[in-house]
Image (cartoon, helix red, strand yellow):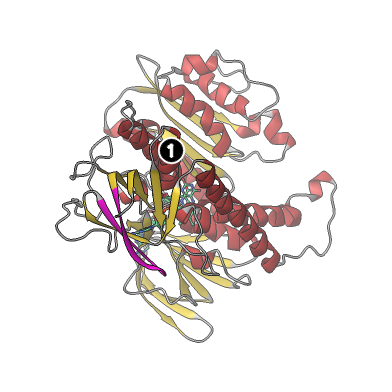
Amino acid sequence: MSQHYDVVVIGAGPAGYVAAIRCAQLGLNTACVDQWTDDNGKPSLGGTCLNVGCIPSKALLDSSEHYYRVQHQLRSHGIQIEGAAMDVKVMLARKEKIVSTLTKGIDGLFKHNKIAFVHGHGRLVAKDHIKITNQDGEKTVRAANVILATGSAPIELSIAPFDGKRVVDSTGALNFKQTPKRLGVVGAGVIGLELGSVWSRLGAKVVILEALPTLLPTVDQQIAKDAERQFKQQGLDIRLGTTVKGAKSTADSVTVSYTDRDSEHQLEVDRLVVAVGRRPYTEDLFEPGVGVDLDDRGFIRVDEHCRTSVPGVYAVGDVVRGPMLAHKGSEEGSAVAELIAGQSAHVNYDVIPWVIYTHPEIAWVGRAEQDLQKEEIPYNAGMFPFAATGRALAIEDTAGRVKILAHKHTDEILGVHIIGPQASELIAEVVMAMEFSASAEDIARTVHAHPTLSEAVHEAALSVHKRAIHRAN
Ligand code: FAD
Ligand code: NAD
């Protein structure tokens, strides 16, 4: 007789593992199936995020930023370091150690919460039957509820297919054994900018080819322009409005042909990273006829409670609509667990923060100024530059600003955009404020410690009403 669970989760990324843990906390008998294996062929929990996404990329961003600072920013502190060198192998080993600490941590949490983990490929053969295939063969388990959390995969371009050597995806770009002298990147999105920054800081000459005529078009355009200026100063060669026509690899280089508005060009690089977005991953996930609907882009179709077209089957994370962000998937996972347990739960999709972990960091939540203009929503804008805060001067990290957009009549905060030091951490305050429908006045009246970077948030809120203290209004 097959095993029977209250819930089976397929996928142990940040959407699936959080869903499984929350289900177990709520007393549901839960199993989680995941097929990920590490380089040694061992199961590794945590999905894209922990294994080849958020965590390893941030580890490399941190290492490369230290190296960059040692080379370019410590002399004014009186620190002189001669002959600094980067040992890429050590940097990669550090990254792997962080990944393995965290993936093993999920394993421990599963055991602690008595979640049955099954390594293997899960396939929905009926609304309450999951077939699991692994090295031991095949077995079927039954579940009253199923949560699909199978994530996403990189989009491949037919004109520049991945070969795992010269033309790679983001996973390849996390694992170069030495710094390429010349690195090409297709796509100036989040991955292109983060991983382009890593290798540029380590000495690669990085050229980023972007199809669109503007950088980061969904980001507040004033902030995006600040970012473009900063990236150019750092030596990132971002070429907008380009169309890649093909990529030809030889034993030691790859030649990319592309056109821009004016003419045709050839770019010879040692490695090419293609980072043009990710697609929902549903390969071999359903038996035909199970009835789980997909939308026209291949995402599993869900309602606002992550319910699919099949009763008792939910889907969360990158495999469904909305931003492909770990924290968005985790919130959906928690909410679905609570719904299954009979509680009420929802995800506030209007208040999901985004962060790009470049230097300076870029973080935002809510609407951009161009969105408000398009939607004809009346607003006041407040702004404050980090250069006018003592803390930013003390840490010698002054580039950037905080921008707060509040409704002209109600003063409710509609969007906050930060480019600058610790933007990833500073955004949390305003996310919380927006979750409680706070006004700019609420932040302006909140005491912020001195000297901190958060004073820039405080001053930007004051500036919404033209009463910032440390700048002319
Ligand atoms: P995934 O993490 O993709 O997990 C899905 C899991 O399901 C995988 O383990 C997969 O093997 C498994 N699976 C799939 N099909 C089956 C099946 N049929 N049977 C069994 N198992 C299956 N997001 C952020 O918020 N912050 C960041 O800083 C950030 N950085 C990123 C950097 C990079 C380089 C990349 C590539 C992504 C980054 N992301 C970041 C995005 C983030 O990784 C994803 O949004 C997140 O991992 C999605 O979580 P998920 O659980 O939906 O899917
Ligand atoms: P992206 O959507 O952020 O950017 C892709 C870029 O490629 C876009 O600017 C797009 O215009 C461009 N593009 C598309 N086709 C092209 C072509 N043929 N030629 C040139 N340019 C082309 O996607 P990504 O950078 O691959 O990242 C995927 C997703 O992973 C992100 O959207 C994000 O959700 C997630 N992610 C998040 C973080 C983070 O939160 N810090 C970091 C990395 C990845």
| Residue 366 position by quadrant | top left
- Residue 13 visible in the shown view: no
Observer-nearest residue: 214 or 291? 291
Q: Note whether residue 160 is visible.
A: yes
> Would residue 245 appear left or right of 186 to someone viewing this image?
left
For residue 368, above or below residue 157: above
Q: Nearer the viewer, residue 7 or 186?
A: 7
Q: Is residue 340 magenta?
A: no
Q: Relative to 329, is 239 above or below?
A: below
Residue 100 x, y percent position in the rendering: 60, 56
| Secondary structure type for disc 1 | helix
For disc 1, does the CB lie below 8 Å from ligand 1? no
Say above or below: 461 vs 17: above
Q: Residue furthest front?
A: 1
Classify 10 Å Cα crowding around label 1: few (below 14), some (14-19), many (20 and above): many
Quarter of the image with the C terminus is top right
Q: Name the outermost residue toward the bottom.
A: 251
Q: Count the numbered circles shown.
A: 1
| Residues in magenta, as a range | 129-142
Q: Whole-percent x and y of residue 289?
A: 14, 57
* Magenta-colored segment: predominant secondary structure: strand
Q: Is residue 31 left or right of residue 165?
A: left
In percent of the image, x 41 and y 68: which residue is there? Answer: 136
Q: At which x and y percent is residue 194?
A: 53, 54
Mark 1: which amino acid?
Ala
Q: Quadrant of ligand 2?
A: bottom left
Query: What residue is shown with label 1?
Result: 24
In percent of width and height, residue 127 lies at: 21, 49
Q: Closer to the camera, 128 or 300?
A: 128
- Give me the residue at 50% from left, 46% from top: 110
Q: Residue at x 85, y 47 (%)?
A: 78
Image quadrant where residue 459 sits: top right
